[in-house]
Amino acid sequence: MVDHSRRYQDFTYVYPVISRRSRGLSIGINLNPDKRCNFDCVYCEVDRKVPGKATHVDLVQAADELRWLSNHALSGGLALEPKFSEVPELSRHIRDFAFSGDGEPTMVPNFDECVEMAARVRIELGLTETQIVLITDAAGLDKVSVRRGLEVMDRNEGEVWAKLDAGTEGYFREINRGFVSFGRILRNLSLTARQRPIVIQSLFLKLHGQSMPTSELMAYCQRLVEIQASGGRIKEVHAYTIARPTPEVWATRLTLTELEGIADVIRQATGLKVLTFD
Ligand code: SF4
């Protein structure tokens, strides 16, 4: 029974979104209402001037919100809401529970418990076709609790969508402005992809009107080849660009033609399946 007096807009951890990359309804689980991230991407849309809501994940509350919102979607309640009424058929089928949100999910100290919570709700509601997706900047994929969480994901239709926006340390510093080394990101991608196939998510953009230089794009392709040469499996690459204006006004979107051109280069250089989302 769904309590219709509640509103997901008031929730702390869980939110619904129709996602092209998920091909339908994705229920996001925001493990970083405090907005913590170990990257500072030039295209980040999270407004860190406004303080975050909570500093830790209350797993009981998060599970309760996830259960309620899932039931709200399954019972057709979400499809009646103005934001979702244009796609009512999509709003009743939950494609995934996605660890995503206002920061980097792997920064929480108990990532494994967060995955176990999502897996429990998934099984409890009989959502056997719903994936558990981790959207990550890859910086924390070597942490013990994260690796334990990934093993729980492996048993629950899990999939890792890991960010890679650069081919060299210099461009990585320019775009992602992370607090970790590019070498650690690459090692983590290989480590994770050796355990299960991963999806690489790459955002391509213009900096001060300039697209990624050809040499950088070739270096990026080479990094993908190296991950595979190390025994890693890459299921596919999601290439996308900036969707909305960013706080850094000199970081701007590519046209679909420009993005498709980059995707073609990646396909030819790596042999990988590349999907584009503009
Ligand atoms: S990794 Fe994501 S949340 Fe973190 S700064 Fe980059 S875009 Fe923002």
Image (spheres, grey):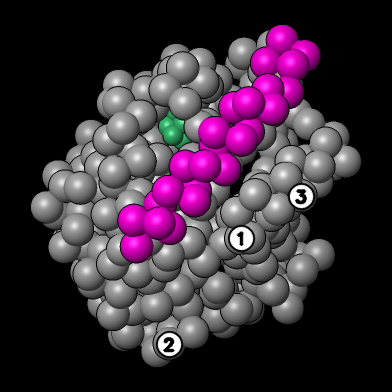
User: Which label sits on residue 128?
Assistant: 2
Which residue is identified by label 3? 264
Q: Is residue 260 left or right of residue 81?
A: right
Is there CB contact under 8 Å for labels 3 and 1?
no
Give the residue displayed 37% in from the left and 23% down from the top: 178
Question: Secondary structure under badge 2?
Answer: loop
Of pointers 3 and 1, the one earlier in the residue sequence: 3
Of the residues shown, which amino acid type is indicated by label 3? Asp
Indicate the position of residue 261 as horizontal and vertical percent values. 81, 42
Q: Which residues are magenta?
A: 207-231
Give the residue displayed 40% in from the left and 52% down from the top: 227
Residue at the far right in the pictured view: 257
- Dominant secondary structure (helix, strand or loop) of the stretch shown in magenta: helix
Q: Residues within 10 Å of mark 2 (few under 14, many from 20)?
A: few
Q: Nearer the viewer, residue 267 or 92?
A: 267
Which residue is identified by label 1? 272
